[in-house]
Amino acid sequence: MAAHFDRRLRKAAVTTTVAAVAVAALSASQAPDVTADGNGRQTTADNVPTSDTPSAESATGNSPYYTDLPPLNSPSPAPTTGTPTSPGSPEAGIPATVLDAYKKAEAELRRAKPGCNLPWQLLAAIGKVESGQARGGRVDAGGTTIGKIIGPQLDGNGFALIKDTDNGVYDGNSSYDNAVGPMQFIPSTWAWAGRDGNGDGKEDPNNVYDAALAAGHYLCRYDWNLSDQADLDRAILSYNNSQDYLNTVLSWLEHYRRGTHEIPDGTGSLPVGRSDDTGAGASPAPGRTSTSTPPKAPGKTPGPGKSPSTPPTSGETTNPGGPSTKPPKDPEPPTSTPTPVPTPTDTVHHLENAGATGLTATAGDTFAKRISARAETKAGDAVGKVRIRFTVLGDTDAAFTGGDKFAAVTTDASGTAEAPALVAGEQTGEFTVRATVIGRTLPGLDYKATVTERVADTLTRTTDTELTCTPGGEFADPVAVKATLKGAVADKVAVTATLIKSDADPTENDKGPYFKDADGKAVRTLTGRKTDAKGVLELPKLYADDAEGTYILRLTTPGGGTLDVTLTVAKAAETTPEPSTDPSGTPSAGPSETPTAEPSTGPEA
């Protein structure tokens, strides 16, 4: 790699040399090596990435990348929409659709993982280094590349050795994996990191919206904060484990932060130098799709009229006491390809459950047991240093800590990998967590998990007001209850309310009080109502038909909470007016008690 940069710097302009030195100074602090702990979070080991870090752990499989550096002068900021009138540096221009994908991915990550602080300029820097911004923005209106961008096959011949993991679905290669798409994901990484960024229901590594969103989530895993330089370095190195790669991405990140502008799709400039260049001054075609031929060992340049294969003549002699004047022969090519040494992953025959059974949790709670898998050889021996991918499958909102549906963990010396804690969502029912070996097409190991309803063991009314109503009227006060579990507030607990016939007959009544549905029709059973954060639920208003009597509203919850509420429907009591009295205290006659005059008897005698 250093030789490649030396060649490039010799043929580059002086300003580019200065830029490279500036980048080296910018990234003088090496990022620490990272490994996954039991929670799936990476921990630091030392200050330099180790040379034996498996390529399958990176996003790209440590595939080749473009090494061109930005110009030393910072670009002039220009409008971000439309064709710029003052474009500034051509290298600062980003094709419109590609730029839109980066910004949409940033916005989504700001919502989903705000603590990550992902800048879209980082996605642009990686996109530049990985594919030259999708080969200068050669994408269709939906963001899918016009022609696939496929890296060299990772067959161990000058590159990492990663055997086929997708049966050639993404890369067209059923023997080895290749990095695919504008962000150059290897299939085994895309299998768990892939995202649907354009809402078409597919996760396509060849679509810049999908790939940019996947790259954003990939860079934001393990609770990394990309505003912190150490976490930023870790994230970039996890994408492609090379210090030169880190320096190159950081240089473009700084360049784009100083200003960018939008250019039409398909008009972007293509990078030239690549990290797998082998000949001095030589550069493969941008976006090449096949592995390079390993270079021959350099020999002496043949004289005019001679080809490298021309055998020496008998008159050629050596210079006694000095260097030979006879052209050295090219080394003989190997007669057979050496057999690669099996990696730990190659020796895995199957996965065994390492003890996780009875996976059950109440909605919203964390599963008490962790899922763990053990990698074993055919003979049953443990295999360490193997990457295991855990994936949540099925119609569920359960996820691992942090909200991800996947986790990748390396097996320890005992061959065991433990997944991060699994958190139940609000959706109840069964789902599956599948463990697979990254880099092998072995059968997966499935774990069944169940999410049960939230429960309450007690229901009480929040008031003690009597609930009465006249026939054909409505109850003045709604029924409100509070749910608790062992004395603690029970929030989000489902409550069923049924107007029953009697305590001895809990079937739904066909007369008496009732609720109304959205159409105004009478209903006497309510379901799907849940208590709030304080454990309280207020039911809708109750109405009464013409039937008088005493009725029971029964409320129940999962977990045994039950409450009967009495409802009374009766005519209003008739009142009889009491006789009034005059000021002297003598009862006065009512309207019907008009006094009758006595007959006159004439004057008194």
Image (tube, helix red, strand yellow):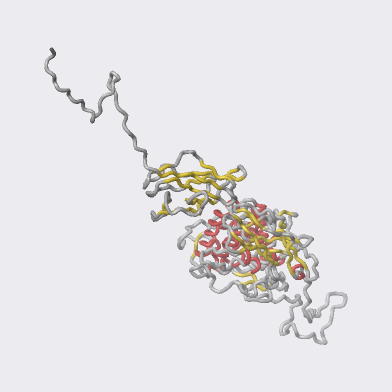
For the point 53% across and 62% down, which residue is it? Answer: 101
Is the residue 485 above or below the residue 285 in the image?
A: above
Q: In this view, does 302 lie to the left or right of 284?
A: right
**Residue extending furthest top?**
605
Query: Is residue 394 at all visible to an observer of this figure?
Result: yes
Q: Which of 340 and 517 is in front in this view?
A: 517
Query: Residue 407 at x, y = what percent?
Result: 66, 60
Query: Residue 450 at x, y = what percent?
Result: 63, 59
Query: Residue 573 at x, y = what percent?
Result: 37, 38
For the point 64% across and 57% down, which residue is it? Answer: 400
Q: Which of 510 and 65 is in front in this view?
A: 510
Query: Is residue 66 at all visible to an observer of this figure?
Result: no
Using the rendered view, name the quadrant where residue 590 is placed. top left
Using the rendered view, name the quadrant where residue 292 is placed. bottom right
Is the residue 99 above or below the residue 473 in the image?
A: below
Q: Is residue 215 left or right of residue 605?
A: right
Q: Nearer the viewer, residue 516 or 207?
A: 516
* Quadrant where the N terminus is found in the figure: bottom right
**Residue extending furthest right?**
321
Q: In this view, does 340 lie to the left or right of 135?
A: right
**Residue extending furthest front?**
605
Query: Residue 333 at x, y = what percent?
Result: 77, 80
For the point 61% across and 42% down, which residue is it? Answer: 487
* Quadrant where the C terminus is found in the figure: top left
